[in-house]
Image: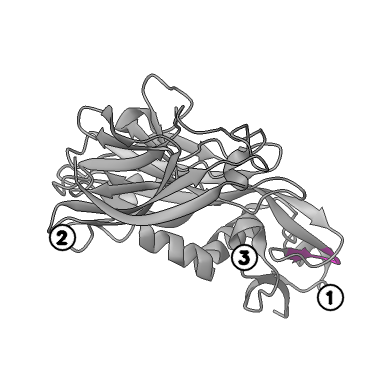
Protein backbone atom coordinates (compact mmCIF):
# COMPACT_ATOMS: atom_id res chain seq x y z
CA UNK A 1 0.00 0.00 0.00
CA UNK A 2 1.36 3.44 -0.88
CA UNK A 3 2.42 5.54 2.05
CA UNK A 4 2.93 9.23 2.67
CA UNK A 5 5.01 10.71 5.43
CA UNK A 6 4.41 13.15 8.24
CA UNK A 7 7.73 14.71 9.15
CA UNK A 8 8.42 15.28 12.85
CA UNK A 9 11.67 17.19 13.58
CA UNK A 10 13.54 16.52 16.80
CA UNK A 11 12.43 18.59 19.75
CA UNK A 12 14.72 21.30 21.05
CA UNK A 13 14.20 21.36 24.81
CA UNK A 14 13.81 24.53 26.83
CA UNK A 15 11.36 26.33 24.62
CA UNK A 16 13.00 24.86 22.02
CA UNK A 17 15.70 26.68 20.15
CA UNK A 18 15.69 26.93 16.39
CA UNK A 19 17.87 24.82 14.18
CA UNK A 20 16.52 21.30 14.67
CA UNK A 21 17.42 19.48 11.46
CA UNK A 22 16.93 15.78 12.23
CA UNK A 23 13.51 14.25 11.65
CA UNK A 24 11.40 11.18 12.29
CA UNK A 25 8.68 9.84 10.04
CA UNK A 26 5.13 8.81 10.84
CA UNK A 27 3.80 6.64 8.01
CA UNK A 28 0.12 7.11 7.19
CA UNK A 29 -1.88 5.36 4.45
CA UNK A 30 -2.05 7.37 1.23
CA UNK A 31 -5.36 9.04 0.32
CA UNK A 32 -5.70 7.58 -3.20
CA UNK A 33 -7.43 4.45 -1.86
CA UNK A 34 -11.18 3.89 -1.48
CA UNK A 35 -12.51 5.66 1.64
CA UNK A 36 -13.32 2.38 3.41
CA UNK A 37 -9.71 1.24 3.06
CA UNK A 38 -8.09 4.44 4.31
CA UNK A 39 -6.92 4.41 7.92
CA UNK A 40 -7.56 7.75 9.68
CA UNK A 41 -4.67 10.20 9.68
CA UNK A 42 -3.25 11.26 13.04
CA UNK A 43 -5.18 14.13 14.59
CA UNK A 44 -3.43 16.99 16.36
CA UNK A 45 -3.57 15.31 19.77
CA UNK A 46 -3.58 11.70 18.62
CA UNK A 47 -1.55 9.19 20.59
CA UNK A 48 0.63 8.59 17.53
CA UNK A 49 1.67 12.23 17.19
CA UNK A 50 2.15 12.81 20.92
CA UNK A 51 4.16 9.61 21.21
CA UNK A 52 6.47 10.70 18.39
CA UNK A 53 7.03 14.06 20.07
CA UNK A 54 7.89 12.26 23.30
CA UNK A 55 10.32 9.93 21.52
CA UNK A 56 12.03 12.80 19.72
CA UNK A 57 12.47 14.67 22.99
CA UNK A 58 14.87 11.94 24.09
CA UNK A 59 17.09 12.53 21.05
CA UNK A 60 17.61 16.23 21.73
CA UNK A 61 21.18 17.11 22.66
CA UNK A 62 20.23 19.29 25.61
CA UNK A 63 17.90 16.61 26.93
CA UNK A 64 20.72 14.06 26.73
CA UNK A 65 22.91 16.40 28.74
CA UNK A 66 20.28 16.69 31.49
CA UNK A 67 19.68 12.95 31.60
CA UNK A 68 23.40 12.37 32.13
CA UNK A 69 23.20 14.57 35.23
CA UNK A 70 20.90 12.05 36.91
CA UNK A 71 22.76 9.92 39.46
CA UNK A 72 21.23 6.66 38.34
CA UNK A 73 23.51 4.14 40.15
CA UNK A 74 23.04 1.86 37.14
CA UNK A 75 26.72 0.92 37.00
CA UNK A 76 26.79 -0.23 40.62
CA UNK A 77 23.40 -1.98 40.45
CA UNK A 78 23.48 -4.95 38.08
CA UNK A 79 19.81 -5.82 38.48
CA UNK A 80 18.25 -2.71 36.92
CA UNK A 81 16.01 -3.54 33.93
CA UNK A 82 16.40 -1.45 30.79
CA UNK A 83 12.63 -0.89 30.64
CA UNK A 84 9.52 -1.62 32.62
CA UNK A 85 8.48 -5.27 32.73
CA UNK A 86 5.68 -6.67 30.59
CA UNK A 87 3.66 -7.31 33.75
CA UNK A 88 3.80 -3.61 34.65
CA UNK A 89 3.61 -2.15 31.14
CA UNK A 90 -0.02 -1.09 31.61
CA UNK A 91 1.19 1.55 34.10
CA UNK A 92 2.71 3.53 31.21
CA UNK A 93 0.15 5.25 28.92
CA UNK A 94 0.81 4.90 25.15
CA UNK A 95 1.97 8.51 24.61
CA UNK A 96 4.77 8.26 27.16
CA UNK A 97 8.43 7.53 26.45
CA UNK A 98 11.12 6.41 28.89
CA UNK A 99 13.18 9.35 30.13
CA UNK A 100 15.50 8.03 32.85
CA UNK A 101 15.85 5.53 35.68
CA UNK A 102 17.31 6.25 39.12
CA UNK A 103 18.15 3.40 41.50
CA UNK A 104 18.40 3.40 45.28
CA UNK A 105 21.83 3.15 46.88
CA UNK A 106 20.97 -0.35 48.14
CA UNK A 107 19.87 -1.40 44.61
CA UNK A 108 16.55 -2.73 45.93
CA UNK A 109 14.29 -0.30 44.03
CA UNK A 110 14.32 1.83 40.89
CA UNK A 111 12.49 5.00 40.03
CA UNK A 112 11.45 4.96 36.37
CA UNK A 113 10.50 8.29 34.80
CA UNK A 114 8.41 8.53 31.64
CA UNK A 115 7.65 11.77 29.79
CA UNK A 116 4.88 12.78 27.43
CA UNK A 117 3.71 15.75 25.43
CA UNK A 118 0.23 16.55 26.78
CA UNK A 119 -1.26 18.50 23.87
CA UNK A 120 -0.36 20.22 20.61
CA UNK A 121 -0.88 23.86 19.65
CA UNK A 122 -0.96 25.33 16.14
CA UNK A 123 2.02 27.39 15.00
CA UNK A 124 2.05 29.92 12.16
CA UNK A 125 5.65 29.13 11.24
CA UNK A 126 8.17 26.41 11.93
CA UNK A 127 9.17 26.54 15.62
CA UNK A 128 12.03 24.55 17.06
CA UNK A 129 9.59 21.83 18.07
CA UNK A 130 6.80 20.89 15.68
CA UNK A 131 4.81 18.20 13.96
CA UNK A 132 3.14 18.52 10.57
CA UNK A 133 -0.44 17.29 10.26
CA UNK A 134 -1.80 17.95 6.80
CA UNK A 135 -0.82 21.49 5.85
CA UNK A 136 -0.58 22.82 9.44
CA UNK A 137 2.25 22.90 11.95
CA UNK A 138 1.83 22.09 15.63
CA UNK A 139 4.11 22.38 18.66
CA UNK A 140 3.85 20.65 21.99
CA UNK A 141 1.78 22.76 24.37
CA UNK A 142 2.86 21.07 27.58
CA UNK A 143 4.80 18.27 29.18
CA UNK A 144 4.23 15.83 32.01
CA UNK A 145 6.15 13.00 33.66
CA UNK A 146 4.86 9.77 35.18
CA UNK A 147 6.99 8.43 38.02
CA UNK A 148 6.92 4.68 38.72
CA UNK A 149 8.66 2.95 41.63
CA UNK A 150 9.68 -0.67 40.98
CA UNK A 151 10.66 -3.12 43.72
CA UNK A 152 13.64 -4.93 42.21
CA UNK A 153 13.26 -7.95 44.50
CA UNK A 154 9.58 -8.70 43.89
CA UNK A 155 9.16 -7.01 40.49
CA UNK A 156 6.08 -5.16 41.75
CA UNK A 157 5.63 -1.58 40.59
CA UNK A 158 3.37 1.33 41.53
CA UNK A 159 2.78 4.81 40.17
CA UNK A 160 3.95 7.49 42.59
CA UNK A 161 2.20 10.18 40.56
CA UNK A 162 2.65 12.76 37.83
CA UNK A 163 5.08 15.66 37.70
CA UNK A 164 3.59 18.47 35.66
CA UNK A 165 4.90 21.68 34.15
CA UNK A 166 5.58 24.41 36.72
CA UNK A 167 4.96 27.83 35.21
CA UNK A 168 4.81 31.48 36.24
CA UNK A 169 4.47 34.80 34.49
CA UNK A 170 7.90 34.58 32.88
CA UNK A 171 9.20 31.08 33.53
CA UNK A 172 8.44 27.42 33.17
CA UNK A 173 10.13 24.15 33.95
CA UNK A 174 9.87 20.52 35.02
CA UNK A 175 11.14 18.93 38.22
CA UNK A 176 12.94 15.71 37.30
CA UNK A 177 14.35 13.10 39.74
CA UNK A 178 18.10 13.49 40.18
CA UNK A 179 19.03 10.95 42.88
CA UNK A 180 17.95 9.22 46.07
CA UNK A 181 19.42 10.59 49.27
CA UNK A 182 22.09 8.41 50.87
CA UNK A 183 19.57 6.69 53.17
CA UNK A 184 17.12 6.18 50.26
CA UNK A 185 14.30 7.83 52.22
CA UNK A 186 13.97 10.85 49.94
CA UNK A 187 14.33 11.83 46.32
CA UNK A 188 16.19 14.90 45.09
CA UNK A 189 14.53 16.58 42.12
CA UNK A 190 16.26 18.97 39.75
CA UNK A 191 14.34 21.77 38.02
CA UNK A 192 14.93 21.74 34.27
CA UNK A 193 14.13 25.36 33.44
CA UNK A 194 12.82 26.54 30.08
CA UNK A 195 13.83 29.86 28.55
CA UNK A 196 12.30 32.86 30.37
CA UNK A 197 9.38 34.70 28.82
CA UNK A 198 9.93 37.76 26.70
CA UNK A 199 10.91 40.73 28.81
CA UNK A 200 10.96 38.70 32.02
CA UNK A 201 13.76 38.00 34.44
CA UNK A 202 15.18 34.51 34.55
CA UNK A 203 13.83 32.27 37.32
CA UNK A 204 15.52 29.06 38.46
CA UNK A 205 13.54 26.81 40.79
CA UNK A 206 16.64 24.90 41.88
CA UNK A 207 16.05 21.60 43.68
CA UNK A 208 13.42 19.90 45.83
CA UNK A 209 14.05 17.17 48.39
CA UNK A 210 10.91 15.11 48.93
CA UNK A 211 9.93 11.90 50.76
CA UNK A 212 9.44 9.09 48.24
CA UNK A 213 5.66 9.07 48.65
CA UNK A 214 5.44 12.88 48.43
CA UNK A 215 7.35 13.26 45.18
CA UNK A 216 4.37 14.87 43.44
CA UNK A 217 3.39 17.07 46.42
CA UNK A 218 6.19 19.54 45.86
CA UNK A 219 4.27 22.58 47.15
CA UNK A 220 3.98 21.02 50.61
CA UNK A 221 6.59 23.01 52.53
CA UNK A 222 6.11 20.84 55.63
CA UNK A 223 7.30 17.75 53.78
CA UNK A 224 9.41 19.08 50.92
CA UNK A 225 12.63 21.09 51.32
CA UNK A 226 13.52 23.63 48.63
CA UNK A 227 17.14 24.29 47.69
CA UNK A 228 18.52 27.01 45.40
CA UNK A 229 20.54 26.37 42.27
CA UNK A 230 23.65 27.33 44.27
CA UNK A 231 23.75 23.94 45.98
CA UNK A 232 26.45 21.25 46.10
CA UNK A 233 25.55 17.71 47.19
CA UNK A 234 28.28 15.52 48.66
CA UNK A 235 28.85 12.39 50.71
CA UNK A 236 26.94 10.31 48.14
CA UNK A 237 23.93 12.60 48.62
CA UNK A 238 24.09 12.44 52.41
CA UNK A 239 24.65 16.18 52.82
CA UNK A 240 24.49 19.48 50.96
CA UNK A 241 25.84 23.01 51.21
CA UNK A 242 23.93 25.87 49.67
CA UNK A 243 23.83 29.67 49.52
CA UNK A 244 21.06 31.52 51.29
CA UNK A 245 19.81 35.05 51.91
CA UNK A 246 21.44 37.28 54.54
CA UNK A 247 20.11 40.23 56.54
CA UNK A 248 23.66 41.55 56.64
CA UNK A 249 23.39 42.54 52.97
CA UNK A 250 21.00 44.65 50.90
CA UNK A 251 18.27 42.70 49.12
CA UNK A 252 17.07 42.90 45.53
CA UNK A 253 13.85 44.48 44.33
CA UNK A 254 11.30 42.10 42.84
CA UNK A 255 11.08 40.65 40.30
CA UNK A 256 14.76 40.00 40.74
CA UNK A 257 17.09 37.54 42.45
CA UNK A 258 15.38 35.99 45.48
CA UNK A 259 18.65 35.67 47.41
CA UNK A 260 21.62 37.93 47.98
CA UNK A 261 23.82 34.83 48.49
CA UNK A 262 25.10 36.14 51.81
CA UNK A 263 25.12 32.92 53.87
CA UNK A 264 26.68 29.49 53.44
CA UNK A 265 24.23 26.91 54.78
CA UNK A 266 24.50 23.17 55.40
CA UNK A 267 21.78 20.52 55.19
CA UNK A 268 21.80 16.97 56.56
CA UNK A 269 19.73 14.99 54.05
CA UNK A 270 18.88 12.28 56.60
CA UNK A 271 17.54 14.53 59.36
CA UNK A 272 16.71 17.48 57.06
CA UNK A 273 18.21 19.85 59.62
CA UNK A 274 19.91 22.96 58.26
CA UNK A 275 22.48 25.24 59.87
CA UNK A 276 24.35 28.44 59.08
CA UNK A 277 28.01 27.74 58.33
CA UNK A 278 29.24 31.24 57.47
CA UNK A 279 27.72 34.73 57.35
CA UNK A 280 29.70 37.98 57.29
CA UNK A 281 28.83 41.64 57.02
CA UNK A 282 28.45 42.89 53.43
CA UNK A 283 29.85 39.66 52.00
CA UNK A 284 28.44 37.43 49.27
CA UNK A 285 29.72 33.98 48.37
CA UNK A 286 30.27 31.88 45.29
CA UNK A 287 30.96 28.13 45.38
CA UNK A 288 33.93 26.76 43.44
CA UNK A 289 34.02 23.05 44.33
CA UNK A 290 33.87 20.48 47.10
CA UNK A 291 37.01 18.42 47.76
CA UNK A 292 35.76 15.34 49.58
CA UNK A 293 39.26 13.87 49.87
CA UNK A 294 40.49 16.90 51.82
CA UNK A 295 37.02 17.46 53.32
CA UNK A 296 36.95 21.13 52.33
CA UNK A 297 34.72 23.53 50.44
CA UNK A 298 36.48 25.91 48.05
CA UNK A 299 34.62 29.18 47.57
CA UNK A 300 35.02 32.85 46.77
CA UNK A 301 34.13 35.54 49.29
CA UNK A 302 33.11 38.85 47.71
CA UNK A 303 33.32 41.86 50.00
CA UNK A 304 30.99 44.68 48.96
CA UNK A 305 31.77 48.34 49.59
CA UNK A 306 29.03 50.96 49.36
CA UNK A 307 29.64 54.61 48.50
CA UNK A 308 27.78 57.92 48.08
CA UNK A 309 27.10 57.06 44.46
CA UNK A 310 26.06 53.54 45.47
CA UNK A 311 24.48 53.79 48.92
CA UNK A 312 23.68 50.72 50.99
CA UNK A 313 20.06 50.39 49.87
CA UNK A 314 17.96 47.88 47.93
CA UNK A 315 19.71 46.67 44.76
CA UNK A 316 23.01 48.18 45.94
CA UNK A 317 24.78 44.87 45.25
CA UNK A 318 24.51 45.74 41.57
CA UNK A 319 26.69 48.84 41.87
CA UNK A 320 28.85 48.07 44.93
CA UNK A 321 32.64 47.93 44.73
CA UNK A 322 33.77 44.31 45.09
CA UNK A 323 36.90 42.67 46.43
CA UNK A 324 37.18 38.93 45.78
CA UNK A 325 39.17 36.45 47.88
CA UNK A 326 39.63 32.68 47.44
CA UNK A 327 38.86 30.83 50.68
CA UNK A 328 38.20 27.38 52.08
CA UNK A 329 36.36 25.89 55.03
CA UNK A 330 35.87 22.41 56.42
CA UNK A 331 32.84 20.59 55.15
CA UNK A 332 30.05 20.41 57.73
Decide if residue 94 is in sight here.
no
The answer to which of marks 2 and 1 sits earlier in the sequence is 1
The 10 Å Cα crowd at callout 2, few under 14, some 14 to 19, many 20 or more, is few
The answer to which of marks 2 and 3 sits earlier in the sequence is 3
Asked if residue 304 lies left or right of residue 208, the reply is: right
Quadrant assignment for the N terminus: bottom right
The percent coordinates of residue 74 (x first, y second) are 23, 60
The percent coordinates of residue 165 (x first, y second) are 58, 41
Residue for point 49% across, 33% down? 249
Would you name the residue on which mark 1 appears? 32
User: What type of secondary structure mainly makes up the magenta span?
Assistant: strand
Whole-angstrom CA distance, mark 2 to mark 1, is: 55 Å
The residue lying toward the viewer, choosing from 102 and 134, is 102
The residue lying toward the viewer, choosing from 101 and 197, is 197
Would you name the residue on which mark 2 appears? 76
Whole-angstrom CA distance, mark 2 to mark 3, is: 32 Å
Whole-angstrom CA distance, mark 3 to mark 1, is: 35 Å
Residue for point 17% across, 42% down? 154
Would you name the residue on which mark 3 appears? 12
- Residue 303 on the magenta segment: no
Name which quarter of the figure residue 71 lies in.
bottom left
Residue 330 versus residue 58 in the image, above or below: above
Quadrant assignment for the C terminus: top left
Amino acid sequence: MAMKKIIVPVICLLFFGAGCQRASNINVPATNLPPAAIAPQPTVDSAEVLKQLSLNWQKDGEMSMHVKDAKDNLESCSNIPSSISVANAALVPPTYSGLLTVATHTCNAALMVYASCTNAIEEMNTPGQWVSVGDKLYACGGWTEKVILTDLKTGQARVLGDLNLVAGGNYGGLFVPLAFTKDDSRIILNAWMFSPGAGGGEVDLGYKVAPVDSITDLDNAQKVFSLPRQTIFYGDFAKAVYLGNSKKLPSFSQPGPASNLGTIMSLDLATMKSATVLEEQDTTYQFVAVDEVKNILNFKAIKNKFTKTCPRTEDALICSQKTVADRTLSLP
